[in-house]
Image (spheres, rainbow, N blue to C red):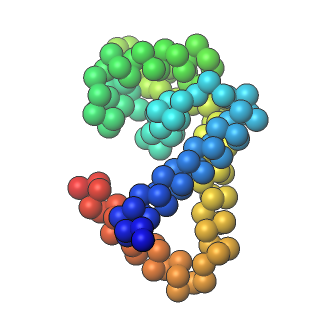
Protein backbone atom coordinates (compact mmCIF):
# COMPACT_ATOMS: atom_id res chain seq x y z
CA UNK A 1 0.00 0.00 0.00
CA UNK A 2 1.23 3.48 -0.88
CA UNK A 3 2.12 5.71 2.02
CA UNK A 4 0.50 9.11 2.55
CA UNK A 5 3.79 10.87 1.77
CA UNK A 6 4.19 8.95 -1.48
CA UNK A 7 0.63 9.82 -2.52
CA UNK A 8 1.21 13.48 -1.68
CA UNK A 9 4.45 13.55 -3.67
CA UNK A 10 2.67 12.00 -6.65
CA UNK A 11 -0.19 14.51 -6.46
CA UNK A 12 2.12 17.54 -6.07
CA UNK A 13 4.22 16.34 -9.01
CA UNK A 14 1.09 15.83 -11.12
CA UNK A 15 -0.25 19.32 -10.31
CA UNK A 16 3.15 20.79 -11.14
CA UNK A 17 3.30 18.95 -14.44
CA UNK A 18 -0.25 19.95 -15.38
CA UNK A 19 0.46 23.64 -14.68
CA UNK A 20 3.74 23.55 -16.61
CA UNK A 21 2.08 21.82 -19.58
CA UNK A 22 -0.79 24.34 -19.62
CA UNK A 23 1.62 27.28 -19.36
CA UNK A 24 3.84 25.92 -22.12
CA UNK A 25 0.90 25.17 -24.43
CA UNK A 26 -0.67 28.60 -23.92
CA UNK A 27 2.61 30.46 -24.32
CA UNK A 28 3.41 28.49 -27.47
CA UNK A 29 0.06 29.63 -28.86
CA UNK A 30 1.05 33.23 -28.03
CA UNK A 31 4.38 32.87 -29.84
CA UNK A 32 6.33 33.07 -26.58
CA UNK A 33 7.67 29.53 -26.46
CA UNK A 34 11.22 30.63 -25.68
CA UNK A 35 10.31 31.76 -22.17
CA UNK A 36 11.41 29.54 -19.32
CA UNK A 37 9.56 29.08 -16.05
CA UNK A 38 12.16 31.31 -14.36
CA UNK A 39 11.68 34.02 -16.99
CA UNK A 40 7.91 33.88 -16.51
CA UNK A 41 8.53 34.28 -12.78
CA UNK A 42 10.63 37.41 -13.47
CA UNK A 43 7.95 38.92 -15.71
CA UNK A 44 5.30 38.16 -13.11
CA UNK A 45 7.34 39.87 -10.39
CA UNK A 46 7.93 42.91 -12.62
CA UNK A 47 4.19 43.13 -13.31
CA UNK A 48 3.32 42.88 -9.62
CA UNK A 49 6.00 45.36 -8.47
CA UNK A 50 4.89 48.04 -10.98
CA UNK A 51 8.01 49.56 -12.52
CA UNK A 52 10.77 48.22 -10.28
CA UNK A 53 14.44 49.07 -10.69
CA UNK A 54 17.08 46.39 -11.26
CA UNK A 55 18.18 46.79 -7.63
CA UNK A 56 14.62 46.27 -6.38
CA UNK A 57 14.28 43.17 -8.56
CA UNK A 58 17.58 41.74 -7.31
CA UNK A 59 16.50 42.30 -3.72
CA UNK A 60 13.05 40.79 -4.29
CA UNK A 61 14.47 37.72 -6.05
CA UNK A 62 17.47 37.37 -3.71
CA UNK A 63 19.90 37.37 -6.62
CA UNK A 64 22.70 39.68 -7.74
CA UNK A 65 22.13 42.77 -9.87
CA UNK A 66 24.21 41.30 -12.74
CA UNK A 67 21.93 38.25 -12.78
CA UNK A 68 18.85 40.45 -13.13
CA UNK A 69 20.60 42.69 -15.67
CA UNK A 70 21.35 39.72 -17.94
CA UNK A 71 17.74 38.55 -17.90
CA UNK A 72 16.39 42.08 -18.35
CA UNK A 73 18.62 42.61 -21.40
CA UNK A 74 17.17 39.48 -23.00
CA UNK A 75 13.63 40.65 -22.21
CA UNK A 76 14.32 44.03 -23.81
CA UNK A 77 15.86 42.41 -26.91
CA UNK A 78 12.84 40.12 -27.26
CA UNK A 79 10.36 42.96 -26.78
CA UNK A 80 8.89 41.96 -23.40
CA UNK A 81 10.30 44.88 -21.39
CA UNK A 82 11.44 48.45 -21.74
CA UNK A 83 13.59 50.61 -19.49
CA UNK A 84 12.30 54.03 -18.53
CA UNK A 85 14.81 56.59 -17.31
CA UNK A 86 13.92 58.80 -14.36
CA UNK A 87 13.76 62.47 -15.23
CA UNK A 88 14.75 63.44 -11.69
CA UNK A 89 17.77 61.13 -11.43
CA UNK A 90 19.28 60.03 -14.76
CA UNK A 91 21.00 57.07 -13.03
CA UNK A 92 17.64 55.43 -12.23
CA UNK A 93 15.87 53.20 -14.74
CA UNK A 94 12.50 51.56 -14.15
CA UNK A 95 11.45 48.31 -15.77
CA UNK A 96 8.09 48.22 -17.48
CA UNK A 97 6.30 45.54 -19.47
CA UNK A 98 5.69 46.27 -23.14
CA UNK A 99 2.43 45.31 -24.84
CA UNK A 100 4.02 41.97 -25.70
CA UNK A 101 5.07 41.46 -22.07
CA UNK A 102 1.60 42.38 -20.79
CA UNK A 103 0.02 39.94 -23.25
CA UNK A 104 2.24 37.11 -21.98
CA UNK A 105 1.43 37.96 -18.35
CA UNK A 106 -2.30 38.10 -19.12
CA UNK A 107 -2.03 34.63 -20.68
CA UNK A 108 -0.09 33.41 -17.63
CA UNK A 109 -2.76 34.77 -15.25
CA UNK A 110 -5.55 33.27 -17.37
CA UNK A 111 -3.94 29.83 -17.18
CA UNK A 112 -3.86 30.03 -13.38
CA UNK A 113 -7.40 31.39 -13.21
CA UNK A 114 -8.73 28.64 -15.49
CA UNK A 115 -6.91 26.01 -13.44
CA UNK A 116 -8.47 27.37 -10.24
CA UNK A 117 -11.91 27.33 -11.86
CA UNK A 118 -11.43 23.68 -12.80
CA UNK A 119 -10.64 22.90 -9.16
CA UNK A 120 -13.76 24.78 -8.02
CA UNK A 121 -15.92 22.81 -10.47
CA UNK A 122 -14.93 19.61 -8.69
CA UNK A 123 -15.31 20.85 -5.11
CA UNK A 124 -18.37 22.04 -3.24
CA UNK A 125 -18.12 25.26 -1.20
CA UNK A 126 -17.16 23.51 2.03
CA UNK A 127 -14.43 21.48 0.31
CA UNK A 128 -13.09 24.58 -1.46
CA UNK A 129 -12.95 26.49 1.83
CA UNK A 130 -11.13 23.58 3.47
CA UNK A 131 -8.65 23.37 0.59
CA UNK A 132 -7.99 27.11 0.90
CA UNK A 133 -7.32 26.73 4.64
CA UNK A 134 -4.93 23.84 4.02
CA UNK A 135 -3.07 25.59 1.20
CA UNK A 136 -2.76 28.80 3.24
CA UNK A 137 -1.34 26.78 6.14
CA UNK A 138 1.20 25.16 3.81
CA UNK A 139 2.16 28.52 2.29
CA UNK A 140 2.69 30.09 5.72
CA UNK A 141 5.12 27.30 6.57
CA UNK A 142 6.91 27.27 3.21
CA UNK A 143 7.18 31.09 2.94
CA UNK A 144 8.56 31.56 6.45
Question: Is residue 122 positioned above or below 55 on the image?
Answer: below
Q: Is residue 108 visible?
A: yes
Residue 94 position by quadrant: top left
Q: Of 6 and 66, which appears nearest the observer?
A: 6
Count the marks: how many? 0
Say whether residue 101 is left or right of residue 13. Answer: right
Q: Position of residue 104 (x, y in %)?
A: 64, 36
Residue drawn at x 62%, y 24% is: 34
Q: Name the quadrant of the N terminus.
A: bottom left
Say whether residue 92 is left or right of residue 75. Answer: left
Q: Position of residue 91 (x, y in %)?
A: 34, 14
Question: Is residue 84 positioned above or below 116 on the image?
Answer: above
Say whether residue 7 is left or right of residue 26. Answer: left
Q: Name the quadrant of the C terminus.
A: bottom left
Q: Of 19 and 50, which appears nearest the observer?
A: 19
**Residue at far front of view:** 1
Q: Is residue 56 visible?
A: no
Residue drawn at x 67%, y 74% is: 121
**Residue at far left of view:** 144
Q: Position of residue 6 (x, y in %)?
A: 39, 61
Q: Position of residue 57 (x, y in %)?
A: 36, 31
**Residue at far right of view:** 29
Residue drawn at x 52%, y 16% is: 74
Q: Of 55 and 107, which appears nearest the observer?
A: 107
Residue drawn at x 38%, y 22% is: 68
Q: Of 53 and 58, which appears nearest the observer?
A: 58
Say whether residue 90 is left or right of residue 40. Answer: left
Amino acid sequence: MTSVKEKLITIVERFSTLMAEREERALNNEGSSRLTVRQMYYLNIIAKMDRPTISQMAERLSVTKPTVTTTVRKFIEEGYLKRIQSEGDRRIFWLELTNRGRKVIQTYYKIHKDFSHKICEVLDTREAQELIKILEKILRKIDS
